[in-house]
Amino acid sequence: MSEFSRLVHIARTDFSYFFRTKWLMAILISLNISDMLVTGLVYKGLIAFDYFRFLVPGIVVMGLFSAATDTGRRIWLALREGVVQYYMTLPVRTSGLVAAYIISGGLGGIVYSGVLLIIAFVVVPPQGIMNAILLLPFLFILATGIAGLAAFFASISRVGEIYWTYAQALQVSMVTISTIFYPASTIAQYLPGPIVTMAENNPLSLAAGALRDSTFGGTALSTSVVFNLLIVSLPLAGIGALSYWIILRTIRIRGKP
Amino acid sequence: MNRVLTLASFNVSQIVAERAGLFLSWALFALQFGIFGSLMSHLVQSSKVQDYFFFYGVGLMVITVFDTGSFVGRRFVERAHEGELPYYLSLPISRRGFLESQAVYGIVATLLRAGPPLIGVLAFTGRLNLLGAFFALISLTTLGLGISGIMISFSFIAFKSIDIYNAIIAGLSALLVRFSTVFYPLMFIPSFYSPVAIFSPLTYGSDLTRWVLGFDPQLLLNPVLAAVVVTAIAVGTLSLSAGIVDKIIEGVKAA
């Protein structure tokens, strides 16, 4: 078995863990579907524009985010419960192990958000299904970036349940300072410049905007948006991979993180 | 009484020990209130909900209380499942005293997590008055006790499978929040959803807290009904929990 096939095997096993965790699936599905079909519909009656149509693509991106960050939970559990020592005995290099985790996080994100996207197509008729298919590889890169970020927080969580606090902080800050729930123009109108810049360059905003405009809005897929998505996602994947690699290397040398 | 307080203070000290987590939870509250609440209040038409910013702030506090209450309940069940309960029951304290210590812990945890955000929201929206804050805290802690009671009442599932228990609690929590008046008034919930919202305890807790804080009563449920339901849920689920500890949790083989 080559190094690459071992990497694929580990990624596939880790990917299957995500979909086998019943409670996690229950949280994600109930959160995302109820956000789409309850919150979206209620706010539609309170807001002057078609908020339901605006929110649904954002919820798809939120699903991608939640599924990809589960990589962090699995890494944190492996580090805390010592399962990582078993991983280190596998005939694969440390970098291969890191890559397998990041790829499985990306796969989890893309498969889960793909399911949400199909549900979204039922409730909001799409204008450009081809654009959605073209966006998928870029959404996969975004999911690996988020998985990398979650891996980073899992790697630096040493005490007790602090990982969950970090995970919550990551989710609240990234979702709140984005255009998932409100248009960029509203943010620009009421909040200071630095927050507007952060919200506009947030990868979740870029992905939600691309889905809204090209998949549900029918305009051509903007190359600049796709390029920006790559530019902000790849460094996140790199930072996460590097920090997890450092932790694994430290364990290999010292026997503990 | 001393033993009850000793056991409760031991549990509370574990929350206080994780100061970073406590401060971060307040900071996240401020972020959500300051950014999400502020932007959504500009999007929501004032002709439909006047002062949505304040409405949202109270909703966010109810979510904080809900999270704390469910954490207290789930922690109790998980500890029982992991076999720690027999140790606690072997302490020189009555069953009733043990449950009282858990209730005191739940109240203090709620006050710690929701108290500072409540003062912050009231000060920021210019509605700070001591009497209102006091009654809001009573309403929120009663709701928190009811939520903990619900989590413990479902504990019989945990002894079949902790995964299924977590799945049911997680799914139920998401639905209780969405199908309630936490973030939007009942009259704006579509008619096919509103009958479900009537069954959510959060609907009554949110509307009661808003009422004691002086929000427009036309958008809220009858405060007497809300107070009765919140109290009944707290008393009912805690009594049920006491029965469950006696008859189901004790003596069950740990995982």
Image: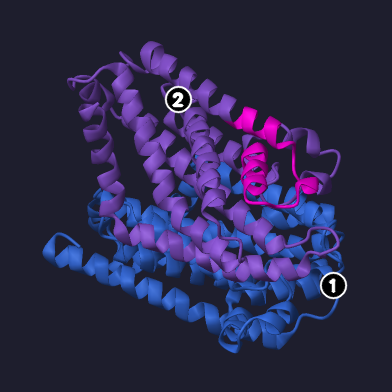
Q: Dot 2, how many residues are within 10 Å of its Cα: few (below 14), some (14-19), or many (20+)?
A: many
Kindly identify which residue carries mark 1. Answer: A217
Indicate whether residue B226 is drawn in magenta: yes
Vertical relation: B122 (above or below) A196: above
Q: Is mark 1 on a helix, strand or loop?
A: loop
Chain bearing tag 1 is: A
What is the x, y in percent for residue A256?
16, 60
- The quadrant in which the C terminus of chain A is found is bottom left
Vertical relation: A59 (above or below) B161: below
Indicate whether residue A225 is drawn in magenta: no
Kindly identify which residue carries mark 2. Answer: B155
For chain B, the rendered hue is purple
Q: Which of A114 and B150 is in front in this view?
A: B150
Q: What stretch is highlighted in magenta?
A: B202-230
User: Can the viewer see residue A3 in this picture?
Assistant: no
Q: Residue at x 82, y 81 (%)?
A: A220
Which amino acid, mark 1? Gly
Q: Main secondary structure of the magenta part?
A: helix
Q: Residue at x 41, y 22 (%)?
A: B159
